Image (cartoon, rainbow, N blue to C red):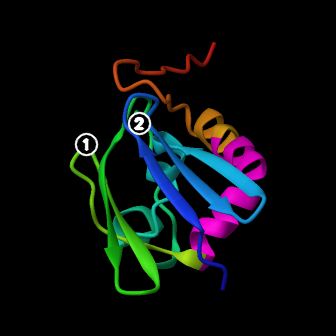
Amino acid sequence: MRIPSAIELHKASKTLSLKYGDESYTLPAEFLRVHSPSAEVQGHGKPILQFGKLGVGLSKIEPAGQYALKLCFDDGHDSGLFTWDYLEQLAQRQDELWADYLQELARAGKSRDPAESVVKLML
């Protein structure tokens, strides 16, 4: 288990920066929100696709013991603890996980934009 040597919340850019020695990662709040380890998102083993989270930000971060962070999002979501291992996995696999997420949205006919509703017409 690697613990970040530095953690910074950037409210203006809606990102969380993690530093591990010489390695640095910047994780967008939207990415973290749709990959929350909470039961609301993970669905007790069957993940529930999150959509309409474009523009979501982080309002605060809090330590959870010595093993995790509690991330509080400005859409009211604040359950689920991001363990050090899970945060590192998200950081290292960000591109792959984001591409998978975008494919899932497209398959489901959903949008990242909360003001947009996607309708598929069968002609």
Distance (Cα) linking label 2 and label 1: 9 Å
Give the residue displayed 27% in from the left and 54% down from the top.
77
Give the residue displayed 40% in from the left and 70% down from the top.
69
- Nearer to us in this view, 50 or 16: 16
Could you say whether the residue bearing mark 1 is in a helix, strand or loop?
loop
Residue 9 appears in view: yes
Q: Which residue is mark 2?
A: 53
- Nearer to us in this view, 61 or 114: 61
Screen quadrant of the C terminus:
top right
- Nearer to us in this view, 122 or 6: 6
Residue 93 appears in view: no
Magenta stretch: residue 89 in it?
yes
Using the image, tell me which numbered label, if any, was put on residue 29.
none
Q: Is residue 96 left or right of residue 15?
A: right
Q: Is residue 88 left or right of residue 65?
A: right
Give the residue displayed 76% in from the left and 57% down from the top.
23
> Residue 42: x percent and y percent?
46, 68
Could you say whether the residue bearing mark 2 is in a helix, strand or loop?
loop
> Residue 116: x percent and y percent?
40, 18
* Residue kind at label 1, given as amino acid type: Asp
CB-based contact (under 8 Å), mark 2 and mark 1: yes
Magenta stretch: residue 119 in it?
no
How would you classify the magenta stretch by its main secondary structure?
A: helix
Give the residue displayed 44% in from the left and 30% down from the top.
54
Q: Which residue is mark 1?
A: 75
* Residue kind at label 2, given as amino acid type: Lys
Q: Which residues are magenta?
A: 85-101
Counting residues from the start of the chain, the first of labels 2 and 1 encountered is 2
- Nearer to us in this view, 44 or 85: 85
> Residue 72: x percent and y percent?
29, 55
